[in-house]
Image (cartoon, helix red, strand yellow):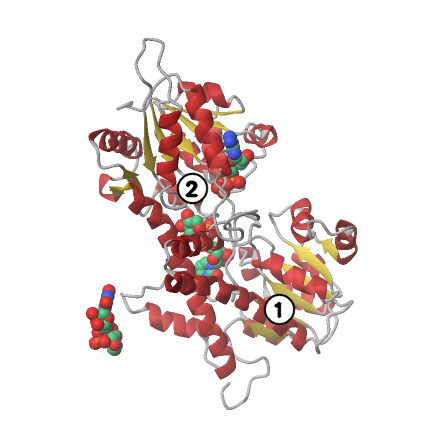
Amino acid sequence: VPTQVRAICCIGAGYVGGPTCSVIALKCPHIKVTIVDVNPVRIAAWNSDVLPVFEPGLDEVVHECRGRNLFFSTDIDAAIQEADLIFVSVNTPTKTSGVGKGFAADLHYVEASTRRIASVATSSKIIVEKSTVPCRTAASMRTILESNSSYTADGTLISFQILSNPEFLAEGTAIRDLLAPDRVLIGSLDTSQGKAAAKALSEVYQNWVNPSKIYETGLWSSELSKLAANALLAQRISSINSLSAICEATGADVDEVAHACGLDARIGPKFLKASVGFGGSCFQKDILNLVYLSESLGLSEVADYWHQVIKMNEYSKERFARKVVSTLFNTITMKKIAVLGFAFKKDTGDTRESAAITLCKYFRQERALISIYDPKVTTNQIMLDLTEPGVVDDAEQVKKQVTIAKSMKEACVDAEAVIICTEWDEFRDASPQDWAEIYASMKKPAFAFDGRGVVDAKILRAVGFKVHTVGKGPLIVDPIWA
Ligand code: UDX
Ligand code: UDX
Ligand code: ADP
């Protein structure tokens, strides 16, 4: 296998592959990086002025490298043939049918890419799993590659080394995370060939990452670490969200509780922000994956333990939605509800598993009229996310019930309640004057529900709103506890 990397191919031009390999191209001008995808629309977008992924700083990176040593293409075979090292960065969604439905990862795309590599490669290569995959996927990939290997023109057997190199970037901060990662994890087989391949990949990262941040492990540890890290992060959010329910019932303030706990160096302050619930393409998918793995290994207590993190997240979303309805005198039928923020977190246009989707679907069932504003999510995406697949005429029904606004002020006109679902800075930074205007344009009594704890409830109350913030005590504050 190659000991030096001169050309890289990345299969899958999505949220992970695109930014990751763009940064590699930026930091390694001597390496030719080609990002390929089966989706020609996506590749065309990567080659245009409007990239298919919104990430702060990404445009600048792509503009600097594209056409220099960074290429986006649909010619997958050519890119595979040219590469010494191939990142497999395709999607691995939760299975929606068959064995493991609702839990296991669908490895169809990983397998298709692996078979493609085996069938077209004309030289030995290092294959790197970038997508989050269940443990031991590398073993399956190896079997496929070895069973389908051919010979080079001069008669030597083409060989493949498989590495696991999970990506830990978070959306919205992808470029920052890639430029200064907490760690780079590289898993390999404990053989001289495996170690040599890991060294070659490590040298790519060492163009900008300090070697002390590069951690080499076995393949299975690396695969499991990715699932474990996401499970532990999500568990912190479900833990603080469970405490937010106690805070609301008692008058404690969840931010104070989180701060007090976070001061303990063993706990630490990060990732303890109470919210309406976590979203994103990773947390739920990876935990379900871990639950499925545990069940398959006969570890049902372990499966139950991690499943509870997801159940608590579902509960958080539902508890918040119920709070809205009960506060609005137990009915929101035909009432206008303004939803601010639709992305699963700020600084991304991604809506996968966004809490806003669950809330809006709940409000739809209660037959509310929903007006949505998000600075980055497209109208098409919102309509798609809110339409129930397979339900006749649902797209038409969504159009009747849901409107998309161009600003937060527009969304709130004539609304009975404003609901903050995403922590966009512009909601946090709105002035008392802005909120006063919004209040004046709404029906009275006007309610505000802050699902992210981003706005100062005092400002909202001062202009007249009745305010509910996640984890911040009852709506009608008992003077004794106030
Ligand atoms: C996550 C991991 O952070 C990243 O390391 C991994 O590679 C992919 O999955 P991502 O899903 O992009 O990244 O975003 P993240 O910042 O982790 O947020 C996930 C969700 O949790 C968001 O909906 C966010 O709003 C929510 N969240 C996060 C909270 O509700 N409270 C917090 O304290 C932190
Ligand atoms: C704990 C809290 O740490 C302390 O802040 C609080 O005031 C009282 O409760 P203590 O029970 O004295 O303190 O000891 P601690 O060091 O927390 O260990 C508790 C148990 O957890 C021990 O049995 C320890 O062996 C175990 N433990 C701790 C682990 O198994 N793994 C760890 O990583 C840490
Ligand atoms: P992630 O968030 O993991 O990056 P995305 O869905 O954003 O996931 O991106 C995965 C990309 O992989 C998609 O653009 C999809 O078209 C692409 N893809 C899936 N299967 C293949 C394949 N066999 N060959 C090339 N590209 C693929």
**At 54% across and 61% down in the image, what residue appears?**
428
Direction from residue 364 to residue 319 in the image, left or right: left
Give the vertical position of 365 relative to 92 (above or below). below
For label 1, the SS is helix
Q: Are marks 1 and 2 in contact (CB under 8 Å)?
A: no
Q: What numbered label is drawn on residue 321?
A: 1
Q: Residue furthest bottom?
A: 480
Image quarter in which the N terminus is found: top left
Quarter containing ligand 1?
bottom left
Type of amino acid under label 1: Ala
Direction from residue 399 to residue 184 in the image, left or right: left
**Percent of width and height locating residue 362:** 66, 64
| Disc 1 residue: CB within 8 Å of ligand 1 | no
Type of amino acid under label 2: Ile
**Percent of width and height locating residue 15:** 49, 40
Give the vertical position of 427 relative to 240 (above or below). above
Closer to us: 464 or 159:
159
Quadrant hosting residue 465: bottom right
Tally of numbered discs: 2
Tell me the crowding category of disc 1: few under 14, some 14 to 19, or many 20 or more residues within 10 angstroms, Cα based.
Answer: many
Quadrant hosting residue 372: bottom right
Q: Residue furthest top?
A: 154
**At 44% across and 63% down in the image, what residue appears?**
237
For label 2, the residue is: 175
**From mark 1 to mark 2, how far is it between C-alphas?**
34 Å
Mark 1 / mark 2, whichever is N-terminal: 2
**Percent of width and height locating residue 374:** 62, 53
